Amino acid sequence: MGAFLACDWGTTHLRAWVVEAGGAVRAGRTFPLGVARLQPGEAPTRLRDEVRPALGAEALPAVLCGMIGSNLGWIQVPYLDCPVDAAGFAAAMHPAPDSEPPAWIAPGLRGPGPTAAPEVLRGEETQVFGWLAQDPARTIGTRLLCLPGTHAKWVLVEDGAVVRFVTAMTGELFEVLSRHSVLRNDASVDDWQAFAAGVEAAGDGGGLAARLFSARSRVVGAGAPAAETASYLSGLLIGAEIASVPRLLNAAAPGPIALIGEPSLCGWYSKAIEQVGLTALTYDGGEAVLAGLIALNAYRIA
């Protein structure tokens, strides 16, 4: 495998690394060039004129994942239907038009959802394949993964293939409720006791719309400090997610749940998971997506 430019190109930012022939990372940098900030058709120019020169990667082929393959990005690459493993996913990468040196864009994944509508994702699948590549033993048996974020993804993997996944809009719900509802507040999520109370209040995750009002009633009716509202609300939403979403996958965790993402957010998820009697292990999302891009490039040229 020769050297290449690895890019995780999301909605708000682009993370890029130069990967040497042996797999070592020579350089890495984050750019404020998310697809939501680009004009139509601007992606190839920004990659050529800004990203490549900044990393000394003018002559290297590139592998791109994330929202750059959506209808907001460079070119819309069709979703692959589950189940799919890393080799099948890499085989579906699409050559980017108007790119010299060449670049390949990863597709997204599509699978059955809890309603009549399908589930879709772009970018997180590369983290999943990277997590699997980091330890070949992970490709044996059934694994339950959670990738926390604005739209958290719960992914069921069987023998190295993504079988099903479910999206939970927990992070976005928290932002909307904290800014535009009767629960609005500007406090930080930093109170573990209030967070734990929210996890407990989530119960089995059912009736969330009714349980949410407790974030207000515990303050105005029971004298809880208003400063606890953000932490309590976060615990309530994350607790409801943990209690209910795995059931949508028909997945009882066969072992520790793998949390892949930003370490601080994964820490709150880990606390909630442990509170309900399950176990979790946390893995860095940036390391996982880089490992995924390296694995996909290796499959591409194999």
Image (cartoon, rainbow, N blue to C red):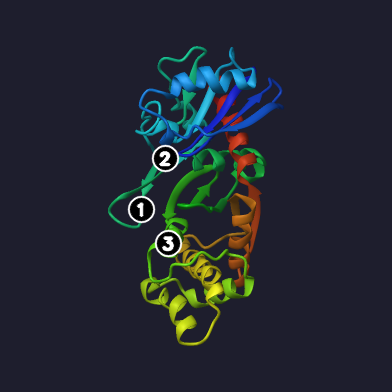
Which residue is rendered at x = 58% and y = 14% of the image?
Answer: 58
Q: Nearer the viewer, mark 2 or mark 3?
A: 3
Picture quadrant of residue 287:
top right
Where is residue 64? Give x, y as percent. Answer: 51, 28
Inter-mark Cα distance, 2 to 1: 12 Å
Where is residue 107? Give x, y as percent. Answer: 43, 32
Label located before the other in sequence (2 or 3) = 2
Quarter occupied by the C terminus = top right
Where is residue 151? Give x, y as percent. Answer: 45, 52
What residue would you read off at disc 3?
A: 179
Which residue is rendered at x = 48% and y = 37% of the image?
Answer: 10
Which residue is rendered at x = 60% and y = 44% of the image?
Answer: 285
Number of other residues with Cα within 10 Å of mark 2, as a class: few under 14, some 14 to 19, many 20 or more: many
What residue would you read off at disc 1?
A: 113
Q: Nearer the viewer, mark 1 or mark 3?
A: 3
Horizontal relation, residue 36 to residue 15: left or right: left
Which residue is rendered at x = 46% and y = 75% of the image?
Answer: 215
Tell me, for residue 109, which label it has, or none.
Answer: 2
Q: Are marks 2 and 3 in contact (CB under 8 Å)?
A: no
Report helix, strand or loop for mark 1: loop
